[in-house]
Amino acid sequence: MKAFRFAVLLGLALCLAGCKGRTPEDTFIAAQKALISLESYSATLTYRVMDEEETREYRFNQWVSMPNSFKIKLIAPENLAGKTIVSDGREILIEHSKVEDSIKFNVKSLEQQRPLFIGDFLNTYLLSEEVGKRIHMEEDIEYVILTCPAMDNKALGDSQELWIRVPKMIPVKLINYKDNEDVSSLILFDEFDRSWKPEDNFFDL
């Protein structure tokens, strides 16, 4: 009987030692590692831009290969559906099949006008001295929220935050704020797939 009790107590001790919950710092480190290790991804995005007069909403498929190759295909609004934007990191090609029109730019000429990508956020977060991190529970779902100034693109706002769903560390939304804390833009990530890899010539212009 004593041997049985000892075995039970030992089992409980091992379980408590092995099943200790993750600390907040462990969660923050895991979230940042997931972002830094991101080589490519695909997602369906809803992009909302708010100003004093109206809120404009766009929906598109997005494919990204780090550090700076991407393809966007618009789904909505209807008048823009089918429009594609492709970049190989050096140039950007914009095509609209409905009107049989296309135009090509140097990346530098448009980098301040494009929607913010996860890679852009990560670069700013890692280079900024004023960053924040917190854990937030919403509808029984745990999120890591990383915040930093919007250093490179003030047209999108003055600060930004990325919401990452725990435990799979999947980005779910990217919010930009004005200096008065009003939301200036919001990106919602749906069907985020970090396992997606581009085929050869996928980003050719």
Image (cartoon, rainbow, N blue to C red):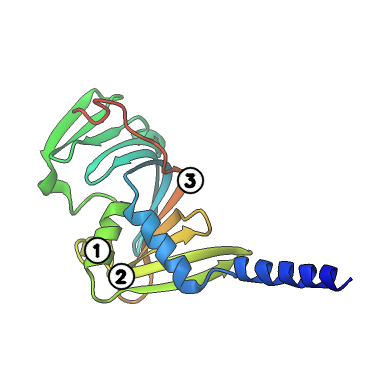
Look at mark 3 in the image and give the residue it sits on. 190
Q: Residue at x 11, y 47 (%)?
A: 109
Query: 177 or 165, which lies in front?
Result: 165
| Distance Cα–Cα, label 2 vs label 1 | 7 Å
Q: Which of the marked residues, 2 or 1, is nearer the chain's N terminus?
A: 1
Query: In this rendering, would 53 be left or right of 164?
Result: left
Inspect the image, locate mark 1, and give the three-letter code of the amino acid beneath it.
Answer: Thr
Look at mark 1 in the image and give the residue it sits on. 124
**Residue 23, x across and y down, in percent:** 51, 72
Query: 92 or 11, which lies in front?
Result: 11
Q: Residue at x 45, y 72 (%)?
A: 25
Query: 145 or 50, which lies in front?
Result: 145
Q: Is residue 32 visible?
A: yes
- Residue 40 image-quadrant placement: top left
Inspect the image, locate mark 2, and give the three-letter code of the amino acid beneath it.
Answer: Cys
Q: Which of the marked residues, 1 or 3, is nearer the chain's N terminus?
A: 1
Q: SS at mark 2? A: strand
Task: Please tell me the numbered disc located at residue 156.
Answer: none
